[in-house]
Amino acid sequence: MVNVELKNISKSFGPVKANQDINIKVKSGEILGLLGENGAGKSTLMNILCGLYRPDTGKIIINNDEKNFNNPGDAINAGVGMVHQHFMLVPIFTVTENVILGNEETGRLNHLKIDESEQKVREISEKYSLLVDPKEITERLPVGTQQRVEIIKVLFRSAELIIFDEPTAVLTPQEVKELFNIMNALKESGKAIIFITHKLHEVREVCDSISILRAGTIVGDADPKNVSNKELATLMVGRPVNLSLERKKNKTGKSILKVKDLSVLSENQEIAVNKVSFEVKEGEIVGLAGVQGNGQTELVESITGLREIVSGEIDFFDKSMQSLTPRKIHKLGVRHIPEDRQKSGIIGNFSVSENKILNDYYQSPFSKNYIMSWENVDTVSKKVVQNFDIRTPSINTFAENLSGGNQQKLVVGRELSNNVDFLIASQPTRGIDVGSIEYIHKQLIETRNNGKGILLISTELDEILALSDRILVMFEGHVIKEFESNASIEEIGLAMAGQA
C-alpha cells in the first residue's frame, strides 16, 4: 500500500515559473489523471517526484514520511517509477538487458545473473499480461511493446507508484486499448498510478480522478464520470474550445499528386507498399488511415524523396518527381510534417529559430552570398512562435528543451508558414493539447480552402473523419478501400483490420 502527497510544490527556471504551489494526492488502487496543455508544467512536476529535479519549495510525502530526493535513485528506492514519453532504451540490447541496466545483479567474478533476471522479467510479464519476450532485441519490437519494456523496468525495481508521462502519444488505437488494460491490471494489484496526458477522452475513460494544470498551477479537480470534454477543455486552456470543426464542401481543381502502381521496399527489403494508386487534387484533404506499420511510412518517404521506389510512378502536377532529391521536391512547394518529430522533424541541439529555417537557410531572405541574416531569421521565428503558441523562454532555446508538444508545434509551424502547394501531414497533432489541435486543424482546413492539396496520415480516426474529403485505408501495403467523408468509424475500423 502506498499514499503519496505533493504539498505546495513550486519550481522555477530563471524567470519561468514551471510549478506554483501545487497540491495533489494519489493512493494505492487509484489512477489520477494529470491533464494540461503542452508546457503547463506536468512533466516538471513529475520530474520532481522522480528525483530528476529538486523543488524550490514544498514537500513530497510518502506514507506519512517526508522525502528528500537528491537523485532518481532515491525516488526508485522509495517506490516511485516513471514510464517516460520518449523511451529510455538501448536499441541493440535485449529486453532483459534494458530492464536490468543500472540495477544489475552479479555473481562470482562479477558475471551477470542474466538467467535469473530473464526469469524475473518473464514472471512480471506474465503477471500483468505484458506479453514480452525477455530475450528479444529491443529495436525489433514495435513501439507498443517497447513501452511495455519500460513498464517492466519500473516493476522490476518494485515501484508502488507508477507515473505514465504522455504514454499514448506514439501508440495506435489498438495499442492504447491494450495499455489501458495493463494500467487497470496494475491498479487492481494495488499500484498507485499518475497518468499525464492532454487527451480528454482518455482521462475520462481510465482515471478515477482528474487534476487540471494550467500555466504551472492546479486550476481544478474533476470526477471523470461527471465532467464533459468541453468542460475539461475550458479548464485546461482557459477559454472555450470548439471541439467540432466546420468543414464546408470544397470545389476541387486539377490533380496535384498522382501515384500509380507504386511499390516500395521496407528496411528489411520486403515489399512495404504494393502497387498503390491514388491522387490528391487541389482543394482537398485525402486521409490515409491504417494501423501503423502497414506501409504508410514507406509511402510518405517515397513521395518526399527519402526512399527509393521499386516500380511505379509519382507525378506532381503531371511531371515526374521520383528521381528528384528531397531539396528539389521541397522547392516544388511540397511540405512534410514527419511522423517522428525527434527523429526527422527537429535537431535537438539547434535553437528554435535555427529549426525554423532548416529547409530554407541557404536562400533569401535568410542568407545571401553565404552570409546569414539572423535578423530576418529572428523575425520569422518570433512570428511562428506567436502564431502557433510555442511555449518557449526564447527563440534561442534549444529545441530539445521544449516539451514534446511544443516540439511538434514548432515542426507544424515551420511547414505551414512556408509557401505550400502540397502538404504531407503525418500524425500532425501527435502529442499536442486540445487547444493546439483546434488551431492546427483550422490551419489545415484553411490551407485546403485556399486550393492546396493535403495528404493526411493519422492513427486518430476522429481526426481523419473530421478533416478528410476522401479516406483511403492501407492494410499490408495495399490501399484496400476508399471511403467518402461521411463513413463511420466502424466501417473504417473493419477495413483497417483487413476486412474490405
Image (spheres, grey):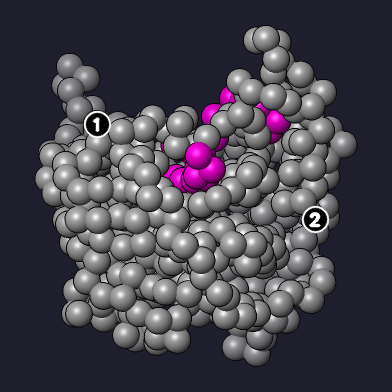
Residue beneath disc 1? 92
Residue 128 image position (x, y, % from top left): 28, 65
Q: What is the secondary structure assignment of the residue under circle 1?
A: loop
* Quadrant in which residue 270 is drawn: top left
Tags 2 and 1 touching, CB below 8 Å: no
Residue 185 is inside the magenta segment:
no
As drawn, which residue projects farthest toward the bottom?
226
Residue at image coords 22%, 71%: 480
Number of marks present in the image shown: 2
Left or right of 400, for residue 303:
left
Q: Identify the amino acid type marked 2.
A: Ala
Residue 397 image position (x, y, % from top left): 72, 30
Q: Earlier in the sequence, mark 2 or mark 1?
A: 1
- Above or below — where is 482 with respect to 330? below
Residue at image coords 60%, 40%: 51
Residue beneath disc 2? 215
Q: 4 or 170: which is nearer to us? A: 170
Asked if residue 177 shows in the view, the reply is yes
Which image quadrant: the C terminus?
bottom left
Q: Identify the amino acid type marked 1.
A: Ile
Asked if residue 180 shows in the view, the reply is no
Q: Residues within 10 Å of mark 2 (few under 14, many from 20)?
A: many
- Which segment is the magenta one? 332-354
Residue at image coords 59%, 62%: 451
- Above or below — where is 21 with respect to 34? above
